[in-house]
Amino acid sequence: LAALLGNGLIITTIAWDHHLHTPMYFFLLNLALLDLGAISTTVPKSMDNFLRDTRDISYAGCIIQVFLSVFLLSAEYFLLTTMSYDRYVAICRPLHYETLLGSRVCLHLAAAVWVCGCLYALLHTANTFSLAFCQGNAVDQFFCEIPQILKLSCSTSYLRELWVILVGSCLVFVCFVLIVVSYVQIFRAVLRIPSQQGRHKAFATCLPHLAVVSLFVSTVIFAYLKPSSISSPSLDLVVSVLYSVVPPAVNPLIYSLRNQELKVALSQLIPGCFQKQ
């Protein structure tokens, strides 16, 4: 409910207030859409199963859930990389901001994020469900998670999935390097700003994005790279909740607390809605 309310308010506010029709808020709107999709892919089905006291999901439903989960998570990571570039241009090359991030460029970047996420999800899903499964059909998780599905595959057949994981690891590493390089340049530029007020304003526009990136990357890395020696069903469940449920719920709070423009627009939107009612 927190994720639905927070992301829904951000989407509505940005769409309603023309002062927020800038590249930064355009990418933030896309992030809110991805967060809404990510949490809607896993949580409603698990809630329905809990209320009906069952753990069933159809084979087709599991395929769709895997595709959407990989698509939305990978697209969100690509989008966070794009948002770091937006902050880099805004702070390090402000005079060229309108040229480097015009409306057409932003649309192309957003389209590339969604298309790349979709293509990677298609590749990952097709390879996962082309495996031979010989270890039963019970996924020990509250949604169809690829690591848990791979545990059901035959010991030799799952090796075909390794090259897809390798491609994904390379993409993750490249995006991570781009984010790090962007923020190194940003911090160098901010520290050269003579006034304390200017440095504070620059940091205020970057810290929410940096916090969201840190939360997303740390939870996903721990979920997929934690040692098998400390793996257990209860820990796997907690970690999956951390990267699939917590970021979509917390991201709107992080951005709204540190963003004065968004808070002002939101305060104007809500009274307006009440007056119309």
Image: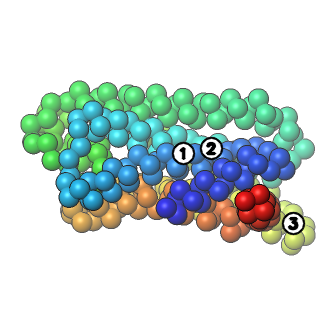
Report the residue marked by disc 3.
Answer: 198
Q: Is residue 74 left or right of residue 263?
A: left
At label 3, which amino acid type do we have? Gly
Q: Residues within 10 Å of mark 3 (few under 14, many from 20)?
A: few
Residue occupied by mark 2: 30
* Quadrant of residue 257 within the rendered picture: bottom right
- Percent position of residue 175, x then y: 55, 43
Q: Which residue is mark 1?
A: 34
131 over 272 or under it: above or below = above
In the image, residue 255 above or below residue 165: below
Contact? badges 3 and 2 (CB < 8 Å):
no
* Residue that appears at 72% across and 35% down: 106
User: Which residue is at the front of the view, 122 or 171?
Assistant: 122
Question: What's the residue at 24%, 66% (across, down)?
Answer: 234
Residue at position x 90%, y 70% in the image = 195
Residue placed most toward the observer, 88 or 32: 32
Q: Position of residue 140 (x, y in %)?
A: 20, 53
- Distance from Cα at disc 3 to Cα at disc 2: 28 Å
Q: Earlier in the sequence, mark 3 or mark 1?
A: 1
